[in-house]
Image (tube, rainbow, N blue to C red):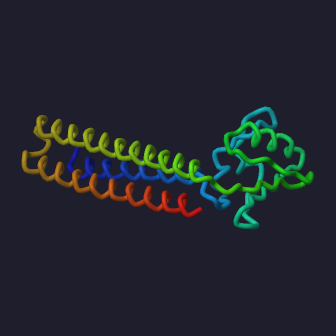
Amino acid sequence: MSADNITTEAEDRMEKAIEHLKNNLSGIRTGRANPGLVDSLRVEVYGSLQPIKQIASVSVPEPTQLLIRPYDTGAIKDIEKAIVASDLGMAPQSDGRVIRLNVPALSTEVRKKLVARIKELSEEAKVSIRNVRRDCNKSAETAEKNKEIGEDIRDDIKNEIQELTKKFEEKVTELAKTRENEVMEG
């Protein structure tokens, strides 16, 4: 594996860890309505589990309300059932055409639990980034042992990967801090 390939792979995999974190953080409630709250919701309809995005549009008509408009009104009962069965903690209100979800205000205790969850997710992302660093450092060492690159290049690769690790860990910290602030101010 060439030096460029090793660093490119490291950067790509670290970027994926950031995307995964962003995706997980979008599902964490704040006091405001956000379509990301129901992104992970899967609805049993037409004989299989479908992501909510594929069977309904989700909008935010008010800061504390989600509006779910099914493409097929026949699926409305299935969507309601999925919402009740989920851990969203919201009661669906339906008029037969759309479902309204009122996002309740968060208590201080719930906010603290959500912040703890954000910290867990950010730590998982950092561990993932460090695993990428370890794997790519091993690749550099293997390439050096196989005489594909020299010691100087191996050391340069390791330094570059360390810089990438620092950069991506800072991104994780920044994303987590932003989300924590959103949760605490609600």
Q: Which residue is drawn at 89% across and 49% down?
A: 73
Task: State the residue lying farthest toward the bottom.
Answer: 62
Furthest residue toward left: 151
Q: How many marks?
A: 0
- Image coords of residue 176 (percent x, y): 44, 56
Answer left or right for 1 relative to 123: left
Q: Position of residue 66 (x, y in %)?
A: 74, 58
Instruction: Tell me the quarter of the image containing the N terminus.
Output: top left
Residue at 18% across / 42% down in the picture? 140
Residue 89 figure quarter: top right
Q: In this view, does 52 lie to the left or right of 27?
A: right
Q: Which residue is drawn at 85% across and 46% down?
A: 76
Q: Quadrant of the C terminus?
A: bottom right
Nearest to the observer: residue 121 or residue 130 = 121
Nearer-the-camera pick, 136 or 172: 172
* x and y, in percent, of residue 126 in the image: 35, 46
* Residue found at x 81% / y 36%: 46
Foreground pick, 6 / 58: 58
Side of 30 relative to 120 (left or right): right
